[in-house]
Amino acid sequence: MNLPEHIALLSPSKNAEVALLELARQIANRDELEIQEVLSDSYILEVCSREKLGRKDKLKLVRAKLEQIRFPLLKDLESRLERCKKAIQKELGLTLELPAQLEGDTISLRLKFRSEVDVLNASKKLGSLAKMDQTKEIFSILSGEI
Amino acid sequence: MSIEPSASIISSSRPERILLAREVAESVLAKRVISRLPGVPVELVDDHQDPLRAKVGNSGLETRSRDFSAGKKDLLLCRYKGDWLRACPGTNSHVCCNLWTVNPGEGCPLDCTYCYLQSYLKRNPTLKLYTNTDEMLGAIEQKVKAEPSRFFRVGTGEVIDSLVWDDLTDSTLELVPFFARQSNALLELKTKTANIGNLVDLGSRYSNNTVVSWSVNAKPVNFEDESATASFDERLLAMAEVQEAGYRIGLHFDPLIYFSGWEDGYQDAVREIFEVVDPDNVAWVSVSTLRYKPEMQEVMETRFPESKIPYGEQFLAKDGKMRYVQPLRLKMIKFVWHQLKQVSNTLPSYMCMESPAAWRAVSGGAPVAGEELREVFTRKGRLNIIQPQGSEL
């Protein structure tokens, strides 16, 4: 099986080609489509035809789209969690670490202090963190409330 | 509704050839099995080892898959020479239910698409029945009697369906009365068949220490991915008969499979089961989701190209098995758990091979050995097993 011309023109490496074809094959088998149909998804065609986008960026978007089609739930959860993390980072300057591969129910946070004032400020931030909707959403997702 | 309980199962499970190890040619069990498979050719072999073992050893995927399928056509009758009673291996960093296993044979003719035996027995794909069951019973008795303060929940359904060959072997006619005599051991027969004739014949005289368990799934999964097993409805009828005969029932909602409409599918399954089964007569219910070794992904795709299971949202989890992403796993388990608890809040439910995090999310904590789960998780302490009325023990 070869890549269709609009993707082949992006000159993916051999590894990238194998990965794209494997994703497309699995989607095709699941959805009872031809592999070429999967790789000619309208979004993929549109990405490949963008004039202002570089070859590597196009390939990145094509792969992300295929992964999104292959693992819709996982990708949706990842993007929801990422949005929550970003909102928390923006609001409180705290960077949460989620369990690897979402396996587990514990999130981590590393804090550094240079004074007791820092400790006090951090405790206030933690108080705010506990009240944020995004925090609640993270724990909900990790516990299967999706 | 009336069915011949085991008719469909016997026909689909009939081997095409019997391989008879020379050293067991005169055994009672071998003669019995051969006599009940008239017309099936018998070939004497010198070795008790799996005849496909050497061939499969270094072969590639396609050959392995083909040989695994080929192994389902032969039935090797031989002696078992290893340790009979073993602790279930469980899985790394997951909560284990302390089951002991004993295997009166190996391999399963039912060939469900998601069956873990496709990787677990990849080097030993030939179906086997062990003829030295007297030694098996002896080994169990020795172990159980040597540790009288320990409780043994013993399952025969780890690498073989407990009942799939029972119409050929009559093994339950030995096992069930044997366990009925034990004071600190319980037998779990785990099946996807309706092959319950012997159990019903034995009836309540010996049923006190035997739990008859069914692996159950939503009907679409049963239809698409368990095509050689008893249908969901056939299993329900078998449950009703076995319950009527005095046995307690076990249920294994395992593996839960994600598919479009899964919630309705599992809700219906729970509802229909408990229209037949008395919740007070349920010994335990386990719930868990799909899991398999990564190498099985391609084997499934090769052997069952129609199955959609390989294309679910599973990924390599930290225990080295392909699993659904944890939030989805928990959602599915919680859903079924909730359905079960709606039937009866005291239904003894547990999760098989799930993480401590899953226990916290689903049941609010680690599996504390509450009274209803005592039989599952207890390691020590003699159980007060109730002798049924009319027991001849």
Image (cartoon, coloured by chain):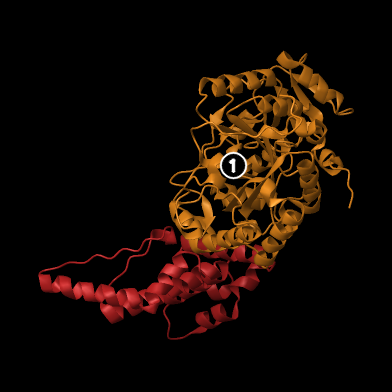
Chain colours: A red, B orange
Quarter holding residue B153: top right
SS state under label 1: helix
For disc 1, the marked residue is: B119
A101 sits left or right of B344 in the view = left
Query: Tag 1: Cα neighbours inside 10 Å, few (<14), some, or many (≥20)?
Result: many
- Whether residue A1 is visible here, answered yes or no, is no
Residue at image location 50% in from the left, 73% down from the top: A76
Q: Residue B312 location in percent, x, y? A: 60, 61
Foreground: B333 or B245? B245
**Which residue is the extreme one toward the front?**
B389
Taking depth in this image into account, of B347 and A73 the one nearest to the observer is B347
Instruction: Return the residue found at the far left.
Output: A115
Q: How far across and how far down the image is residue A71, in percent? A: 54, 67
Task: Read off the chain for label 1.
Answer: B
Residue that appears at 69% across and 41% down? B248
**Is B297 situated above or below B77?**
below
Q: Which residue is drawn at 61% across and 52% down?
A: B347
Q: In this view, does A143 lie above or below B153?
A: below
The image position of residue B344, as x and y in percent, is 63, 56
- When asked about the image quadrant of residue B204, the answer is top right
Tell me where residue B38 sits by quadrant. top right
Question: Would you place residue A39 above or below residue B221 in this image?
Answer: below
The amino acid type found where label 1 is placed reads Ser
Q: Is residue B381 at all visible to an observer of this figure? A: yes
Identify the residue at horizontal 78%, vertical 21% (top origin). B30
Looking at the image, residue B195 sits to the left or right of residue B317; the answer is right
Question: Whole-percent x and y of residue A46?
Answer: 54, 83
Name the one closer to the observer, B53 or B72.
Answer: B72
Quarter of the rendering occupied by the C terminus of chain B: top right
Give whichever of A3, B356 is nearer the camera: B356
